[in-house]
Image (cartoon, grey):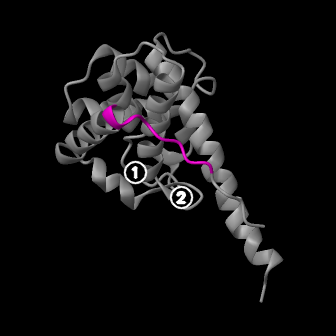
Amino acid sequence: MNRKKKRIHLSKENEKVFREILTEVCKNSRFLSSSRFMQHGSTSVFRHSVAVAYVSFYIAEKYRIRVNCHALIRGALLHDYFLYDWHEKDDSHKWHGFYHAGKALQNAMEDFELSEIEKETIRRHMFPLNPIPPRCREAWIVTLADKICSGGETVEGFREKFEEIRNPL
């Protein structure tokens, strides 16, 4: 079955803002190294993080939610900045879902001067798995966008695997 993917687009002005912030984060950190690690399905942590940032900014734009755009995008880009392969059999990765936000925040603070909004966004993005809810709009938006992107990436990974089974020849 061929499904047509719906594309989302930012306004030209916001697309430019997004690209500038993404470029700044890529130039001044270990962020590009996250492309070596898989997140969900066949999606790298890098691609996942960029998708979460884009969807977050899109949600804020589409629903005209007043946010600090710079903090929203940077917090989203850095929300999974843990810099390891959590799929490796290693006891330190055992509780990844519960602890990676703290590791991402620690790494982000080593590489960037973070605002309180950015810290809150990184720290709280795993709600409700981590039971303390976000306290700002930016963190809530990133939390939602992360769930949207993660779900899509996971389903796409399953779809790829089952496509091989359905069409073995």
Q: CA distance from mark 1 to mark 2?
A: 21 Å
**Residue at (29% x, 36% y) in the render:** 107
Task: Tell me where residue 52 appears, x and y as whole percent.
Answer: 48, 39
Quarter of the N terminus within the rendering: bottom right
Task: Tell me where residue 48 appears, x and y as whole percent.
Answer: 48, 47
Task: Tell me where residue 44 appears, x and y as whole percent.
Answer: 46, 56
- Name which residue type carries label 2: Lys
- Name which residue type carries label 1: Phe
Establish if 116 lies above or below 108: above
Q: Secondary structure at mark 1?
A: helix
**Residue at (50% x, 54% y) in the render:** 90
Q: Is residue 125 visible?
A: no
The numbered mark, 1 or 2, whose residue comes first in the sequence reads 1
Left or right, 83 with respect to 143, comes to left
Q: Secondary structure at mark 2?
A: loop
Establish if 6 lies above or below 110: below
Quarter of the C terminus within the rendering: bottom right
Circle 1 Cα neighbour tier, 10 Å, few/some/many (<14 / 14–19 / ≥20) = many
Q: Which mark is residue 89?
A: 2
**What residue range appears in magenta?**
6-13
Question: Which of these two is toward me, 123 or 63?
Answer: 63
Task: Give the overall secondary structure of the magenta segment.
Answer: loop
Magenta residue check for 12:
yes
Query: Label 2 near label 1: C-beta < 8 Å?
Result: no
Disc 1 designates what residue? 46
Q: Which mark is residue 38?
A: none
Return the residue found at the far front. 12
